[in-house]
Amino acid sequence: FFFKQKTAYEIPKRDWSSDVCSSDLEGSCVSCATYVALSTGKYYKLGSTSYNSSTNLYSIEYLYDQAKVGVPGERCGDGSSVLTNLEIAKNQGVCFEATLPYSYIAVGCQTSPCDTCIITQPMRDQAATQKIATYSLILTSDITAIKQKLYYGKAALVVTLSLDPTAFNSTCGFIWSQDDGSGVYYAAHGMAIVGYDDNKQAFLIQNSYGNTWGCNGLMWISYSFLTYKTYYAYAIQFP
């Protein structure tokens, strides 16, 4: 098999982080990254030309309310695991953003099922029509496989990374290629791979801290340093 593709590719731009996801205010980063993967995958599955909260943008709230760890109504920053989010997407499906919009106030601290559960049966019924077929784990050492998934699969991949202060405060033009030597690392943080550039020898990462973070909400990480920082990238596939 001869693999031929562009030397640079980015999933069509959207301001993923400014309007719906504020994971800096609670631990929803993995659900936000999963949302980007699901929504980009659906965008291409439908042959869409724009993103729409009723047809190809999925509900972060649906994922995070069920995937988060910790006590219902408390400890919003405890986060969730990638596998828990992907299992929800595979076994339940996820309803659309318009059906259950994201909020980091009050409802974002709930875990379903709970006394004040906001996930209704109509939401679950819609979610059941939107299940992914499967998901897979790709070794980050297999750079070609990750690029293939982006270029041919047309969906973002989910990763977890522990940012150091330099990466956390990155700006346009920055490529994260080594630890900054401070010895300081923030907790494992869910992000989405949305592109690559062979000239930069780097992947483009979408964060969920708003579009004032990094370079319009994005950051580059070198191919080799991604391999160093995390073992797996998670890819989704629609039926």
Image (tube, rainbow, N blue to C red):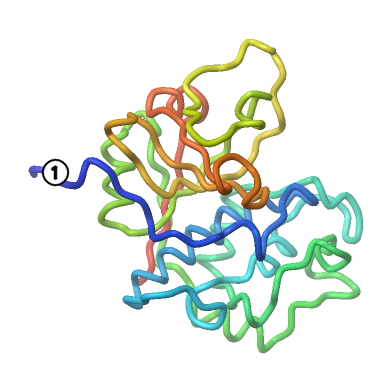
Residue 122: percent from left, percent from top? 66, 89
Residue 69: image x %, image y %? 77, 51
Q: Quadrant of the N terminus?
A: top left
Towards the viewer: 17 or 87 = 17
| Left or right for 90, reference 9 | right
Q: Is 60 left or right of 155, judged from the image as shown?
A: right
Residue 94 is situated, as x and y percent measured from the top left of the image, at: 57, 72
Number of labels in the image equals 1
Would residue 140 appear left or right of 28 to someone viewing this image? left
At 69% from the left and 12% from the top, the residue drawn is 182
36 shown above or below 75: below
Q: In front here: 50 or 141?
A: 50
Residue 56 to residue 84: above or below: below
Q: Amino acid at mark 1?
A: Phe
Query: Quick one: SS at disc 1?
Result: loop
The spot of residue 176 in percent (x, y) is 50, 26
Q: Quadrant of the C terminus?
A: bottom left
**In the image, is residue 185 above or below residue 193?**
above
Q: Residue at x 36, y 75 (%)?
A: 49
Badge 1: few (under 14), some or many (20 or more) residues near its Cα, within 10 Å? few
Q: Residue at left 31%, top 57%?
A: 153
- Please identify the quarter of the rendering in which residue 179 is found: top right
Q: Which residue is mark 1?
A: 3
Image quadrant where residue 111 sits: bottom right
Q: Residue furthest front?
A: 172
In the displayed structure, 92 sits above or below 175; it is: below
Q: Is residue 106 left or right of residue 43?
A: right
